[in-house]
Image: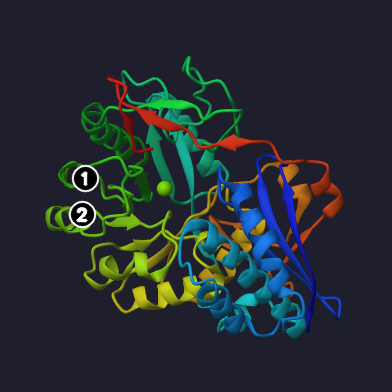
Amino acid sequence: MIIDRADVVVTSPDRNFVTLRLTTDDGLTGLGDATLNGRELAVVAYLQDHVVPLLIGRDASRIEDTWQFLYRGAYWRRGPVTMAAIAAVDTALWDIKGKAAGMPVYQLLGGASRDGLLAYGHASGKDLEELFDSVRAHQEQGYRAIRIQTGVPGLNSIYGIASNATSAANTGVRYDHEPAQRGALPNQEDWDTRAYLRHVPGVFEAVRNEFGPELPLLHDAHHRLTPVQAAQLGKSLEPYDLFWLEDVTPAENQEALRLVRHHTTTPLAIGEVFNTVWDYQQIIREQLIDYVRSAVTHTGGISHLKKVLDYAAQYQIKSGMHGPTDISPVGMAAAMHLGLAIHNFGIQEYMRHGAATDAVFRQSFTWRDGHLHPGDEPGLGVELDLDEAGRHPYVRAYLPYNRLADGTVHDW
Ligand SMILES: [Mg+2]
């Protein structure tokens, strides 16, 4: 099992995806997702120029050794570009090992700890009527846990609201249900924290009144609050029994979560922009969060995220892997295999990919009664159609950014 070919495939069916495809001398192929939303080509260059030459001739069975070689051997550690590139190699090697063994990857990780993975979808609306329609549509699609995002009166265009491209500043073409937009420049969105903090508790009260106490509800504050503001929001949402409140403060400062934690019992989730166990060291040890938001794709692959989650398990902290459409079907499959195997699975984010994406990536997962299962094909269970991928060349796209009313750039 010697790696004798490594191809970096860039395709843009519904959005941009970067996929590493490794081929061994005995004809096995493995896929890894290396998509870094809005900075995709940086990972392409990292892989093509610096990693692919190191992989040719290596033993594909040595997953941990290859991970350590790429991480420690680079000298320059961590960071989203490096860790997405390493993740792609690691995930592709697990795919190959599964195919070589004739087993799905979750079997190699210890076997299934559950029958399926509870997943949540994204309901949104510019007002309550639109939001309720969106919640009902998600329930009809089988979702049993739902994230709630709404417009805020006075703000034109904000995070998490599908099809809201009405702002004069919006010039790009918005992807289906996620915020990155195709275009030469990033779109500008608006932000006003006080207006948001006033509005959100009433939204959750209305949702609970309409849909009852059972439905698990989630919410994403998307890194925009100070610790005191985050504590206020957590307290004000306590009556509505959230499954989690996500990314309340900018994630770089782990200590910020202490103040939030001291003031609210609303469960906290964080980490979709984290890349290594070191980004979680303090917040896991001090039990400042309840859910780890990292994706396999951005956190060094299956091998490294499993280490993060095993560490979290000692503190009763569970997984809540990032899974919007910027995680490719390969990255989603890797998340499903890992989530099925670990004991401390919490919930999986799941937004459906479009038909064009599903034509590029042939998948074998199932979606039943609000639960995902990766299927029992050997490896990850995803095949990349290179001809179909070739029909969708890369299109420049950026995530939006925020400005306050006075023009100040704010966290997006
Ligand atoms: Mg988030």
Please tell me how crowded label 1 is: few (under 14), some (14-19), or many (20+) other residues with Cα within 10 Å.
Answer: many
Q: Which residue is mark 1?
A: 230
Q: Is residue 35 left or right of residue 215?
A: right
| Neighbourhood count class around disc 2 (C-alpha, 10 Å): few under 14, some 14–19, many 20 upward | some
- Which residue is under mark 2? 256
Instruction: State the image coordinates of residue 303 (x, y, percent, origin top left).
Output: 53, 76
Give the mark count: 2
Asked if 405 appears above or below 6 in the picture, the reply is above
User: Residue 406: horizontal and vertical position, in percent?
Assistant: 27, 20
Q: Quadrant of the C terminus?
A: top left
Name which residue lies at 56% across and 51% down: 36
**Callout 1: helix, strand or loop?**
helix
- Residue 8, percent from left and from top: 73, 58
Residue 278 drawn at (x, y percent): 36, 69
Q: Residue at x 55, y 46 (%)?
A: 37
- Position of 58 relative to 312 (above/below): below
Let me know if residue 41 appears in the view: yes
Mark 2: which amino acid?
A: Ala
Q: Is 385 located above or below residue 131 in the figure?
A: below
Q: Upstream in the sequence, badge 2 or badge 1?
A: 1
Contact between labelled residues 1 and 2, with CB atoms less than 8 Å apart: yes
In the image, what residue occupies the spot 56% across and 56% down?
A: 369
Q: Quadrant of the N terminus?
A: bottom right
**Amino acid residing under circle 1:** Ala
